[in-house]
Image (tube, grey):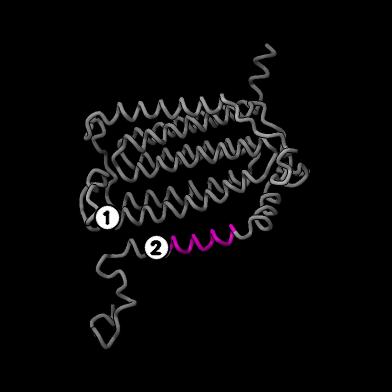
Amino acid sequence: MSLLAVADRAPSVGHGAYLIIAALLFTIGAVGVLVRRNVLVMFMCVELMLNAVNLSFVAFASRLGDINGQVAVFFTLVVAAAEVVVGLGIVVAIFRRRKGTATADDLHILRG
Amino acid sequence: MLLAAEFLSVDNLVFVTGAVVTLIGAFFVVTSRNPVHSALNLVVTLFGVAVLFVSLHATFLAAVQVIVYAGAIVVLFLFVIMLLGVDRDEAIEAEPLKGQRPVAAALGVLILGELALLSNLRFRTPPPDAVAGSITPVVPDKTNVEQLAEAIFTRYLLAFEVTSILLVIAVVGAVVLARKPGRAFGLLAARPEDDPAEVGA
């Protein structure tokens, strides 16, 4: 039996602990989106929130002994990658038009 | 003594290490003045989450987490930060919007309280036999990668194909967005007979 196949022995910590960490991570990300004005840092905080949800997905998958939770995380990763690419493209496009800072406060007018 | 020995098991040590690394990294993502430092702290957080994935026996996702997130997404962040030239400290002490931080802190406490409430309400995960049709049980003698591959390439094949379309759209969209505004479709629109100067471009 290979090392990888040790498989679905439940962690001794208990799955609740993982959910607590996920909740804390999500909260930190949410507060970061609300507090920071730099668009790039706000993006990173969104990534934190996505990771918190991924973590709880994997924790529940382990709790139920169900591989489908991990499949959901796989798809979330793909969508997150696409989201970052498009988001950063938008940031670059905005920067081309209005030189200066990358703060969200400067972007309150939709018309470029 | 027994309790201490039990607490110091490898599982617990891995969990505590991963959790502490994750949360400290996340804290400094939010509080760093320099966006570059935020991005590097994001790597720390993502690595901590990967450690937690390993401790939950999601080995494939842990590897993908490091390769895709830490390897690709954060590099993209750093690339854009440096391309735009915002890689310097900013004054985060100043509060541009009055009362923003107290409100944000209150909302954060609210979110955390809500999550705690939800976890205490015990929306019980139904026993496995009650959801037998929807569950793909973990088989102990197969590796994590094998099981994920079986699920993705049989049951979720359509979704998998759709993600490839999504990725193509994202790539094309990013290229269109990030090009210089005036020349967004320059190569498609320009014809040699219309504008000879464009031919060499």
Element assignment for label 2? helix
Q: Given the image, what chain letter belongs to the residue carrying mark 2?
A: B
Residue appearing at x 39%, y 33% in the figure: B28
Q: Mark 1 points at which residue?
A: A94
Residue A13: where, in percent of width, then height?
Answer: 63, 26
**Which residue, as the protein is rendered here, is positioned at the far top?**
B1
SS majority, magenta: helix
Q: Are marks 2 and 1 in contact (CB under 8 Å)?
A: no
Viewer-closest of A24 and B12: A24
How packed mark 2 is, by other alpha carbons closer than 10 Å (few <14, some 14-19, many 20 or more), is some
Q: In this view, does B186 lie above or below B175?
A: below
Span colored in magenta: B159-171
- Label 1 environment density (alpha carbons within 10 Å; few <14, some 14–19, many ≥20): some
Relative to A78, B143 lies left or right = right
User: Residue B138: which numbered mark, if any?
Assistant: none
Residue B189: percent from left, percent from top: 31, 78
Residue B193 vs residue B25, the one in the foreground: B193
Q: Which secondary structure, mark 1?
A: helix
How far apart are labels 2 and 1 at the CA level? Answer: 14 Å
Dot 1: chain letter: A
Q: Could you say which is closer to the camera, residue A6 or residue B160?
A: B160
Image side of residue A34 versus residue B135, left or right: left
Q: Residue at image x 31%, y 64%?
A: B179
In which image quadrant can residue B156 be found?
bottom right
Q: Do labels 2 and 1 share a chain?
A: no
- Please state which amino acid type lies under the numbered disc 1: Ile
For the point 40% across and 40% down, which residue is it?
A45
Is B7 part of what is drawn in magenta?
A: no
Percent of width and height locating residue B36 = 35, 43
Q: Which amino acid type is shown beneath numbered disc 2?
A: Gly
Residue holding disc 2: B173
Residue at screen point 44% across, 60% down:
B170
